[in-house]
Image: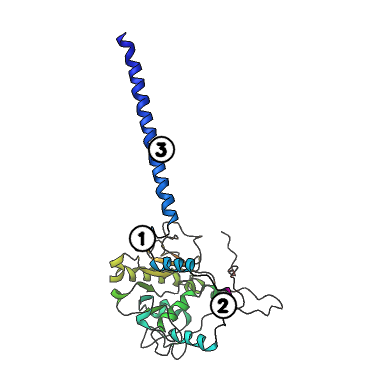
Amino acid sequence: MGDGRIPHSVGFERRRYLFCLFTVSVFVFVFSWFFFLQSAGSPHFIEHGFLPDKKLFSVVDNFKSTPRDLSKEHHESPPTIATIQDEVKEQPSACEPNKTTLKVFMYDLPSEFHFGLLGWKGTDSVWPDISNGVPDYPGGLNLQHSTEYWLTLDLLSSRFSNRRGPCNAVRVDNSSKADIIFVPFFSSLSYNRYSKVNPKEKVSLNRALQDKLVAYLRVQHEWKRSGGRDHVILAHHPNSMLDARMKLWPCMFILSDFGRYPPNVANIDKDIIAPYKHVIRNYDNDSSTFDSRPILLYFQGAIYRKD
């Protein structure tokens, strides 16, 4: 008889435990709803000081307490020429180095890596005096990979005292004060013009320049300091930097796409995609201007990509 009471008492204790647990759960549920409804009924229950933006809630409170005057909203006068001119005056009219977003150190590579590929020959400097004229860039298919040319010119002119308009990047002389290190090698132009091996030569000029660039960068203090991770190298043509890309992979590449790169060499986490230069012909009888087209539909290059 004593053995038969043990299961009964165990079952009773289990049911009592479940009942107590259920009672506590219901009590907590009702209690939480009570506080929720009370807080919902009072807009000042929450202390604004604990929230991210006090101004946001002050605007909301004013919106609730003050009725909107729709007549004023629909009869506000449009901005005048004077107000527009005042806004324009507030914007910087020239490049201000101390207010730029990006500080860039650019290597003074020999001219054979950049403007020398365009036929320019310097005597006293590795850079042309672009204040008196800029070496011409070839047209045709070369234009869609001219990013290297324009970025270099932008940095060279960033400290001109008479430069018009603001600038987002400025060239600095001290690499320790720079955000990034720019490598001014016109790699796409080098591939387009000098990738063929000339008679009596073992390698092409394009291959030779890539080998020289790798050797140059590996002994630079800036490359050793970061392992190349803060360096920007242009390889916009899909076949440019074909021999050096595997050796310089820690850098940030500026590419047209990732089509011919393994993911450990080029990827979206570290590299930049710059679209092809616009080479599409205008539509027939199209009188619209660039500014009148608010939507960019696509970029199209002039090379048929098989991959």
Q: Earlier in the sequence, mark 1 or mark 2?
A: 1
Q: Which quadrant holds residue 307?
A: bottom right
Question: Which amino acid type is marked by label 3?
Answer: Val
Check residue 73 for magenta coloring: yes
Q: Which quadrant holds residue 250?
A: bottom left
**Number of the label disc, if any, that sits on residue 47:** 1
Q: Give the distance between the C-alpha atoms of the residues marked 1 and 3, in whole angstroms.
A: 29 Å
Q: In the image, 72: left or right of 35?
A: right
Residue annotated with mark 2: 72
Q: How many marks?
A: 3
Considering the numbered disc 2 on the image, is that residue within a helix, a strand or a loop? helix
- Depth check: give the residue in front, 52 or 260: 52
Q: Dot 2: few (<14), some (14–19), or many (≥20) neighbours within 10 Å? A: few
Q: Main secondary structure of the magenta part?
A: helix
- Depth check: give the residue in front, 52 or 155: 52
Q: Dot 1: few (<14), some (14–19), or many (≥20) neighbours within 10 Å? A: few
The x and y percentages for residue 191 are: 49, 71
**Which residues make up the magenta segment?**
70-75
Considering the numbered disc 1 on the image, is that residue within a helix, a strand or a loop? loop
